[in-house]
Image (spheres, rainbow, N blue to C red):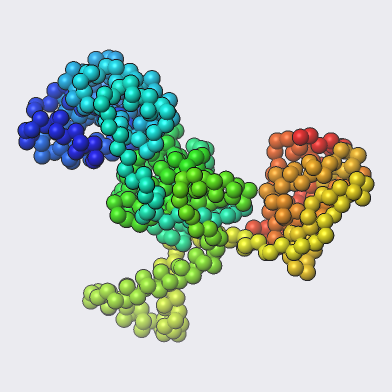
Amino acid sequence: MAYGLAMAAELLGGEDRLPPAGAPLALIVAPTRELALQVKTELTWLYANAGGRVVSVVGGMDPLAERRLLNAGAHIVVGTPGRMRDHLERSNLRPDNLRVVVLDEADEMLDLGFKEELEAILEETPAERRTLMFSATVPRGIAALAKGYQRDALRLEVGGADPQHVDIEYRACVVAPYELERAVVNLLRLEDPALAMVFCATRAAVARLHGNLTERGFSTVALSGELSQAERTRALQNLRDGRARVCVATDVAARGIDLPELGLVIHAELPRDPDTLLHRSGRTGRAGRKGISQLIVPHTRRALAQRLLQAARVQATWGPAPSADAVRAKDAERIGEKAAQLVAEPANEDDLAIARAVLTDPRMVAAGPEAVAAALIRTLRGPLPAPEEIAEERPQRVERPDYRDPRTDQRISRDGPREAGQEGIWFHMDVGRDGNADPKWLLPFLCRRGHVTRAEIGRIRILPNETQFEVAPYAAGRFATASRKATGENAEIRIEPMQPLPREPHSTGQRPERASHRGPHKPRG
């Protein structure tokens, strides 16, 4: 919209209407198909009264159909870099009459490797054109592009001194690595936004989370690079029509998407840098609306999350992930309100006749009014996905004396994961002093293998043929599950509990199956 207004003077030339459509007067280059199609929609509306004709040329669409549209004439052409360059090289797109070229999300196009395409497009356009570049950041590549292809350029920085995203509330919660997906479920259920976007780092993660959320009963669509253009267009239309309420996406696929009703952004996987954090979060809190940007942080990456927030100059409120009880309490509040609204609505005679028949039914009379109301509540609760049980906040650490290896007299770890008055859960692994088990190697290995922190490992005893160690009771089930699923280096090392595991929300309480013995091991790494 901003550059649609900015280039109006060049396109209209002081007239009320545009001249007949022929060779285009303006080119708009955008990094993704979705953003290009969105820009086309906005410009079509903006220039409708001026007789404007806007054509899109994007990857994934039929190039022959696009060539026919270009041959029929256009005032503005919007497209992605590769397809636009292709039409220029094939002479389907004639640049002779161009007055304006716009590079939208220029930094993202450089990040995606479109530098060569952008330079080829700009080289083909008339030297006297007006060039507008829009970029969230101005890295060295953008500065060089501007210097090479703009003359007497003015750099306008909007909102640089203001706090980032004043209409967005940033929140962060720390969870165990294996509870990321459960936290996503409970956040969606607790906030219950009209639309939500969940960001993942890879296409595989998008596919997995999309499938799991759909299986749990959420109306979900996915956006990633592996989808065809038709599938991506259909997914966005489902979001705009209300047939879907959750979009799981990668960063590139969601670039520039505008969904006004989007009230919640969830970072299921942490962004790679502060700019990505801001771009993701910027999908919500638009046009004066309020929004929430929620980071789900594995406890092993809390320091990284704090650095990201600091570099992005945003303040986040830290708290626990929503529990199943919190979701149920919110459900009770919403269902009660919904029931009250239904009762307050005037009923027609047909509905009243059915209601009288139901209430006078001997079975209903015998059940009583509470049973009838409970049936209504069950009906209202039925479509809601079930909340997930998430481990409670970790108890405070109780200081205990450090354990020292009797052979080397070297401190191995602090004793502190045990709950007050309660011993930890003991495990043993089939590597000991004779297998070169070393205190400096053991503690990091156990943390990686069992997805726990150093504070959740207690005493360690290095024996000749095995090593025994203590795990905090609240983390024992998680440690046992993760250690059974180990892959990669040292995955052959066998770890088993020495006593029954405590029952936890996510633990069966069973001891892990005993792995077959593979002989003596020597740790690597």
Residue shown at 10%/34% (left/top)?
51
Quadrant where the image shows the N terminus: top left
- Relative to 98, is 320 on the left or the right? right
- Relative to 326, is 162 on the left or the right? left
Quadrant where the image shows the C terminus: top right
Residue shown at 87%/43% (left/top)?
432
Coordinates of residue 31 in the picture (x, y in percent): 36, 31
Of residue 413 and residue 151, the one placed in the foreground of this image is 151
Displayed quadrant of residue 346:
bottom left
Of residue 499 and residue 81, the one placed in the foreground of this image is 81
Coordinates of residue 343 in the picture (x, y in percent): 32, 76
- Relative to 250, is 488 on the left or the right? right
Residue 46 shows in the view:
yes
Residue shown at 37%/38% (left/top)?
136
Residue 238 shows in the view:
no
Coordinates of residue 125 in the picture (x, y in percent): 24, 19
Instruction: Say if 123 sits above or below 293 in the image.
Output: above
Of residue 182 and residue 117, the one placed in the foreground of this image is 117
Please state the total of marks drawn on the protein image: 0
Coordinates of residue 127 in the picture (x, y in percent): 23, 18
Residue shown at 42%/45% (left/top)?
278
Instruction: Say if 157 sits above or below 125 in the image.
Output: below
